[in-house]
Image (spheres, helix red, strand yellow):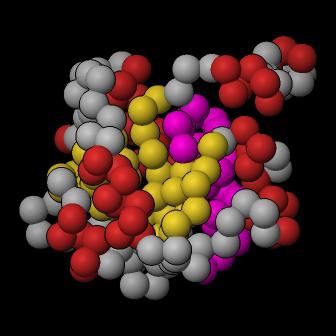
Amino acid sequence: MRKLSMDELNRKTVEEFKQAEKHKIIVVLDNIRSAYNVGSIFRTSDAFLIECIFVCGYTPPPTHRQVDKTALGASETVDWMQFDNIMDAILQLQQNDYKIYAIEQAEQSISLENFSIPPNQKTAVVFGNEVTGVQDLVMQQCDGCIEIPQQGMKHSLNVSVAAGVVLWQLVKSISHPGL
């Protein structure tokens, strides 16, 4: 067994990425403290051809040096928009017919393995602050809540890890329904 070379990976150029058809998923980051987490989520969003990232509140934008350091160029490929107030982002999503789901542990949440995106549904997923999670006001505006099943003591994942788990499962549900 050997690792594939960079040429064998068939990596897209920035222009090829921009032209590629994206999954109709928008990632909403609300008051994420760590620029490194934001950069990591940009890389994950690049890997899964996510449509856009909404950077809300005091979440560091991709122009921040530490975001760019971790994103490794993904901030050039993944589209993003910045909102001072997450409620403006939520309103824009609602006006454009996106179903909005908080990623949170809450009453009546849907376990991630039981959630799939119906064909042609535009979907947004909200990731909240590393300590306090998704704001209650935002939760009230969402169409539902998705929870990552966990079996350990902590029941807590780093936000960038949670984004990786959720986005992989969502893209899998679109690409291979029923798996």
The image position of residue 2, as x and y in percent, is 84, 22
Tell me the residue at 28%/71% (across/down). 138
Residue toward you, 109 or 2? 109
Q: Quadrant of the N terminus?
A: top right
**In this rendering, is residue 117 above or below 12?**
below
Q: Is residue 92 magenta?
A: no
Q: Is residue 112 visible?
A: no
Tell me the residue at 68%/47% (across/down). 43
Please provide the residue range marked out in magenta.
Answer: 33-52
The image position of residue 172, as x and y in percent, is 41, 29
From the viewer's perspective, tell me whether residue 43 is left or right of residue 97.
right
The image position of residue 127, as x and y in percent, is 43, 64
Main SS, magenta region, reads: helix
From the viewer's perspective, tell me whether residue 9 is left or right of residue 156.
right
Q: Is residue 97 visible?
A: yes
From the viewer's perspective, tell me whether residue 105 is left or right of residue 23.
left
Tell me the residue at 32%/42% (across/down). 96
Q: Is residue 50 magenta?
A: yes
